[in-house]
């Protein structure tokens, strides 16, 4: 990441191909001004104290010669610095601006967030993203300044510290929720890091667990929450999702267990997530999925600057500067919804999805305010009779084909390959065409350049800007200038349509 010392403009941040390059003078100026625009873009590491901080830390600014700057908390922790107790680096927004330079790192990081290194080693992780272990280590060092193991360990520590500060969970539960293999290891890590036991970091008296965890999920402003909520509201499947006022709620299934998550806006550039789930060990994976659903790591400033360079999109970006791409909770669920939505309206697809859920979904033990089921598992749908669902025979056959493909390959909808490869893999399923594959890549695989060009909503949105109806070839040609953020351009066109 290169910060030009001549201008403190976060939109000028880029990544060099030969590694991370932070300009000391520019970073120090941002630190001296406590410029919130750089929160999450770098961390200041004070050599005299051994502490690393966010640029917005209220502590006294150190002397220039006593501070170095590193691009991520992972790099700071691997360099031997410990997190500041005042500015709490675990609460810094995580930005994904660097991810456009290495989709491999992005995919590997997503797998680490979902627990890929909790029970398996780096070799297995490298195999899942299709490269060698040595190359994976090199890419992580180049783009994150830390090894995959250091990234996983730092995530555990920072999640545990957030749970200590923001919840009343007992320490034993926090240890397992953060991914530590034992309470002893949890205590040792915190004593080594902070020179005190984890309980000393908590203010006030700990309370008994209530089976519900409430946490803040930070992002870098701007964030268009009304647009996000409107998109999810229009597509919410009765029985598993609801949007009431400013609150989104849905049922979840993970590891054979069921729960409910609720997300609402909060102050200080954060969403408030309330999680009800029977096992605390599922918390890291749940949080990782929520960050993907609500696109919290997107660098909205950089993306908006790029898209606004096109006069066609500039007014749309100005109208919705923090527009994000809504993700999906589960890849199989999204794929089925996409197939149901082929060549029909969003409302009609939602009606069919609700019928599918009520017929084949597994009921919740305790229904909650209209939420009654979790989405059907691939095994259930693969063996089902869909003749009474009310869809054409060819569509029913495609649903069965998708379910059987998901049973045969549990990682079918995992973020493991480049966009073109992922589209080819998905299109190999009977009845899955270009639009469906691109839509899955856009929302589930989190491919920022995915672009379902034949979508009627996108074409309609472009028509409002051109004043005439465009064809798909014209759209694809024009969309070349939107790379590598065509998914966000699609979202702007959907919004205006």
Image: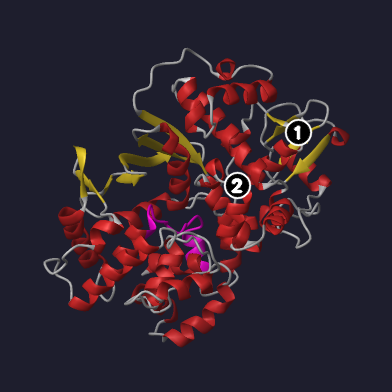
Residue displayed at 73% across by 48% down: 145
Residue 323 drawn in magenta: yes
- Along the line of sight, which residue is nearer the eye, 140 or 135? 135
Q: CA distance from mark 1 to mark 2?
A: 23 Å
- Boundaries of the magenta span: 314-331
Q: Split into 4 quadrants, where in the image is the N terminus?
A: bottom right
Q: Is residue 271 visible to us here?
A: yes
* Protein image colouring: secondary structure
Residue 350 place in picture, x, y as percent: 23, 61
Q: Split into 4 quadrants, where in the image is the C terminus?
A: bottom left
| Foreground label between 1 and 2 | 2
Residue 170 lies, with reference to residue 407, above or below; the image says: above
Left or right placement of residue 200 versus residue 345 in this view? right
Residue 490 drawn in magenta: no
Residue 467 place in picture, x, y as percent: 40, 82
Q: Quadrant of residue 429?
A: bottom left
């Amino acid at each position: 990441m290169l910060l030009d010392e001549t201008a403190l403009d976060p939109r000028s941040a880029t990544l060099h191909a030969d590694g991370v390059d932070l300009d000391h003078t520019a970073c120090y100026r941002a630190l001296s001004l406590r410029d919130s625009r750089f929160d999450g873009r770098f961390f200041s590491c004070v050599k005299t104290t051994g502490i690393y901080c966010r640029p917005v830390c209220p502590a006294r600014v150190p002397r220039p010669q006593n501070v170095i700057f590193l691009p991520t908390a992972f790099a700071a922790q691997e360099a031997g610095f410990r997190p500041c107790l005042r500015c709490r680096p675990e609460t810094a927004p995580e930005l994904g601006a660097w991810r456009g330079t290495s989709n491999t790192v992005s995919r590997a990081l997503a797998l680490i967030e979902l627990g890929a290194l909790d029970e398996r080693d780096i070799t297995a992780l490298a195999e899942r993203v299709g490269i060698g272990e040595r190359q994976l280590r090199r890419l992580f060092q180049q783009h994150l300044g830390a090894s995959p193991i250091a990234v996983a360990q730092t995530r555990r520590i920072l999640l545990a510290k957030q749970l200590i500060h923001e919840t009343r969970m007992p320490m034993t539960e926090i240890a397992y929720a953060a991914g530590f293999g034992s309470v002893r290891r949890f205590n040792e890590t915190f004593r080594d890091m902070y020179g005190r036991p984890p309980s000393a970091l908590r203010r006030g008296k700990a309370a008994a667990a209530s089976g519900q965890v409430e946490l803040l999920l930070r992002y870098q402003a701007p964030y268009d929450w009304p647009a996000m909520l409107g998109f999810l509201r229009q597509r919410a499947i009765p029985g598993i999702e609801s949007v009431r006022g400013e609150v989104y709620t849905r049922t979840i299934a993970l590891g054979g267990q069921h729960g409910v998550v609720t997300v609402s806006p909060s102050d200080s550039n954060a969403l408030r997530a309330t999680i009800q789930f029977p096992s605390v060990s599922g918390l890291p994976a749940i949080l990782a999925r929520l960050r993907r659903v609500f696109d919290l790591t997107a660098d909205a400033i950089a993306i908006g600057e790029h898209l606004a360079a096109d006069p066609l999109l500039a007014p749309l970006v100005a109208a919705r500067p923090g527009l994000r791409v809504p993700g999906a909770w589960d890849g199989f669920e999204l794929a089925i919804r996409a197939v149901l939505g082929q060549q029909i309206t969003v409302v009609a697809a939602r009606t069919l999805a609700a019928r599918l859920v009520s017929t084949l979904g597994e009921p919740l033990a305790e229904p909650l305010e209209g939420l009654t089921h979790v989405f059907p598992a691939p095994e259930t749908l693969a063996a089902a009779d869909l003749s009474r669902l009310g869809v054409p025979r060819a569509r029913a056959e495609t649903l069965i084909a998708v379910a059987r493909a998901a049973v045969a390959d549990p990682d079918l909808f995992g973020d493991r390959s480049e966009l073109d490869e992922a589209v080819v893999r998905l299109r190999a399923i009977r009845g899955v065409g270009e639009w469906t594959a691109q839509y899955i890549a856009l929302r589930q695989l989190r491919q920022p350049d995915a672009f379902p060009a034949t979508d009627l909503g996108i074409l309609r949105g472009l028509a409002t800007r051109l004043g005439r109806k465009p064809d798909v070839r014209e759209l694809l040609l024009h969309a070349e200038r939107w790379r590598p953020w065509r998914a966000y351009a699609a979202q702007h066109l959907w919004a205006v349509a």
